[in-house]
Amino acid sequence: MTRFGVMKHLKQLEEAGLVVSRKHGREKLHFLNPVPIRLVHDRWVSKYAEPWTAALSDLKQSLEKTMEKVFEIYIRTTPERLWEAITDGEIRSKYQFGVAIKSDFTPGSRYEMSAGNGAVNLGEGENLEVDPPRRLVQSFNALWSDDVKAEGTSRVTWEIEPVGDSCRLTVIHDQLPPDAPAELYGGWPMIVSGLKTWLETGQTLTTPGSLMYQPQP
């Protein structure tokens, strides 16, 4: 849904007293208000139905819980140069084993990931948040195999934070199904390692993808 739609729903929840908000710098943080929810629970859920309700709720949360993978690395570079390396298709193909990305990187725009000079489409999605050179949030649809296609849409967040003369890069791949195959997220360690190597030395890694998830002989 759109950001406007989310804001509209949050406003209604605030007016109902179910959500409270507070300003934190440029951000507006929203928190669940458990008090009125508990009052509804105490009034309408009897002590006889509560054990069954709790069991079904736990089952639902267990089955629907999504997976989140977080990768962090420190790179001796500037935020601007790191942002360029993430969003420039030609640069990205140098450290991401020939995989290039194509987009104008504006909020709401589309992007495509491909190999072989565009001959093989590996993934696509939408740029949900674009805040250079600090934060990039993208939806992600993997297309390189039938297994990953079946997993649907996940989300990738790039966060850049300057630390002294370096940057801390955090890549968060979340909204993954609980049983997502490792090939969907297993390549990130090699991608960020290749990015660090290229920015700090101008050289590329020769390792063909992540060895951890390569088929064993």
Image (cartoon, helix red, strand yellow):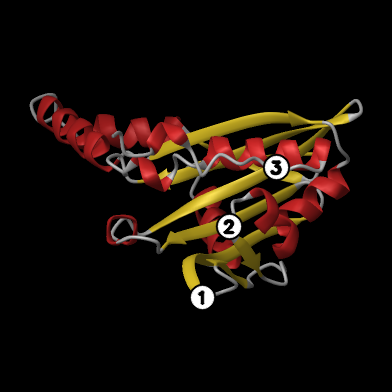
Q: Secondary structure at mark 3?
A: helix
Q: Residue at x 27, y 36 (%)?
A: 61
Residue for badge 3: 195
Residue 119, numbered circle: 1
Labels in figure, total: 3
The one of 103 and 159 positioned closer to us in this rendering: 103
Q: Position of residue 28 (x, y in %)?
A: 69, 45
- Nearest-to-viewer mark from 3 and 2: 3
Residue 191 picture quarter: top right
Residue 216 picture quarter: top left
Residue for badge 2: 138
- Amino acid type, residue under disc 1 in the picture: Ala
101 in relation to 170, above or below? below
Q: Residue at x 63, y 70 (%)?
A: 108
Q: Residue at x 50, y 43 (%)?
A: 209
184 in relation to 129, above or below? above
Q: Secondary structure at mark 2?
A: strand
Q: Position of residue 143 (x, y in %)?
A: 40, 64
The answer to whether the residue labelled 3 contacts the one labelled 2, judged by CB atoms less than 8 Å apart, is: no
- Graded by Cα atoms within 10 Å as few (under 14), some (14 to 19) or many (20 or more), the crowding at tag 1 reads few
Residue 54, numbered circle: none
Q: Is residue 29 left or right of residue 26?
A: left
